[in-house]
Amino acid sequence: MDILIFGARGDLSARKLFPALYHLDSCRLLPEDVQILALAREDISLEVFLNDLKERVRRYVDDQRWSTEQWEAFASRFSYLCFDFRDQAQFQLLAERLAPERTAMFYLATPPSLFGPICEHLGAAQCLEGDRRVLLEKPIGHDLQSCIEVNDTVARFFPEEAIYRLDHYLGKETVQNLLVLRFGNRFINTQWDQSCVDHVQITVAEPIGIEGRWSYYDSVGQLRDMVQNHLMQLLCLVAMEPPNSMTAEGIRDEKVKIVRALRPIDAANVRDHAVRGQYSAGWLRGEPVPGYLEEEDCPETDSRTETFVALKAFIDNWRWAGVPFYLRTGKRMPEKLTEIVITYKALPHNIFAQAGRDDVPNRLVIRLQPNEGIEMQMVSKQHSLKNKMGLVTQTLNLDFLGSSGLDRIPDAYERLFLDAINGDQSLFVGREEVEESWRWCDGLIEAWQENGLGLQRYQAGSWGPTKGELLIEKDGRSWHA
Ligand code: BG6
């Protein structure tokens, strides 16, 4: 198999793609015949490319996996091609390197505006004979219209079974464990609907700011960068019906039904259901940090791009009628925290009230980072002769659900590369899902525009604007973290 990485000198390639391939290789999971062709604009030799890559990859590879010997074996799989992705003539050269009898995987780690042109050039240069797969990094488009255009163009050259749309959140181990937890355990599965669940929270918080990607990020904002894809996927996995089987079609069909059932947030309800924020200067871990408009590479501007979003969403179907899903995501928040919290309804009658005990709801916490794991908050009796019915809230660690004896949890990109190599699309996003998700997000963006955008400032290092707290507190609930 040939793996071709378009955009091989980019940040994503150095931080995620090559370390993932290196780890697979070090676990002997990369098939022996895999050759990697790195394509980028810089006119450098393979030696210079590899020297530079070695230094960059080393930072992201676990110490216990790193050895010069392993690196050399990995490096021997590489070739490098200085390449202009817009120049048709260069694709002719590429065609000469590709043998129709070998499978080729084109990984487009490029801006989405290049997805269409690259596919057209690959087609015109006859690079697509044989088993050909294309991997597309998010975002697919900028809105519904551009997403359809990208999907249409790619579909002219690749059948849907050969298109792998990545959302790296789907490759995270705990996200897959969520499916097993829900659909492999009867007692969880039977307590998973509006009769038992009070509300669901999904938080994806990051302490980082814009990290040198200001101009890209400013044209996108947190809704398009995080909600349209990562949070939407988490929401779907929490809310979807059990698929018939774990096939890609089965899972995608169920996920897309959830996106379609999401109640639109429009001009009439946007003020009550959505909050947009942008960070101003503040403090993180004892250090001062600049505001969004003072970031190093920010030009002079009064940009109103959001770096924080909080939403109250409803899924209008039988299972979830009336259950709010509170979503929150932001940059420059106090810590890295990604978690899904299911809060159960109170019992019909609290028989421990006389013992002075408030009704404390059960909670299931599915944490993706840090410390991936699953916890259940339950009430139990304290061992005591004096205090007969002294109750305590216990946090039960359900980590054994994911125990595997592995010395490390594999990175999401390792799972996704391996699945793409094996032709398994179940953790990749289908065309309909991504388009329906844009349809919903476009409606929300329009509603914000009609309402003058309503941008709230929040201090870097805080949990977002006060309105983000009020969004949930006015319903008598509060954010878990
Ligand atoms: C990317 C976003 O898709 O996900 C980034 O473009 C974000 O803005 C990143 O920082 C978060 O990924 P993770 O795996 O670190 O939570």
Image (cartoon, rainbow, N blue to C red):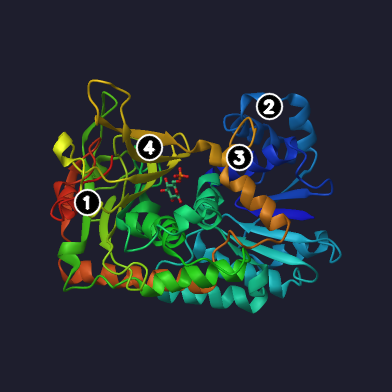
Measured Cα–Cα span from mark 3 to mark 2: 15 Å
Q: Residues within 10 Å of mark 4 (few under 14, many from 20)?
A: some
Q: How far apart are marks 4 and 2 (CA)?
A: 26 Å
**First reached walking from the N terminus: tag 3 or tag 2:** 2
Residue at 61 percent of width and 76 percent of height: 155
Rounded to the nearest angstrom, the CA distance separating label 2 from label 1 is 41 Å
**Residue at image coords 16%, 74%:** 268
In this view, 138 is above or below 257: above
- Please give the residue where the numbered disc 2 appears in the rendered image: 66
Q: Judging from the image, what secondary structure is the residue with disc 2 in?
A: loop
Check residue 277 in the rendering and tell me which mark sits there, or answer none.
1
Label 3 belongs to which residue? 410
Q: Is residue 358 left or right of residue 46?
A: left
The tag earlier along the polypeptide, 2 or 1, is 2
- Disc 3, SS: loop
Nearest to N terminus: mark 3 or mark 1: 1
Tell me which numbered mark, 3 or 4, is placed earlier along the sequence.
Answer: 4
Q: Residue at x 62, y 63 (%)?
A: 246
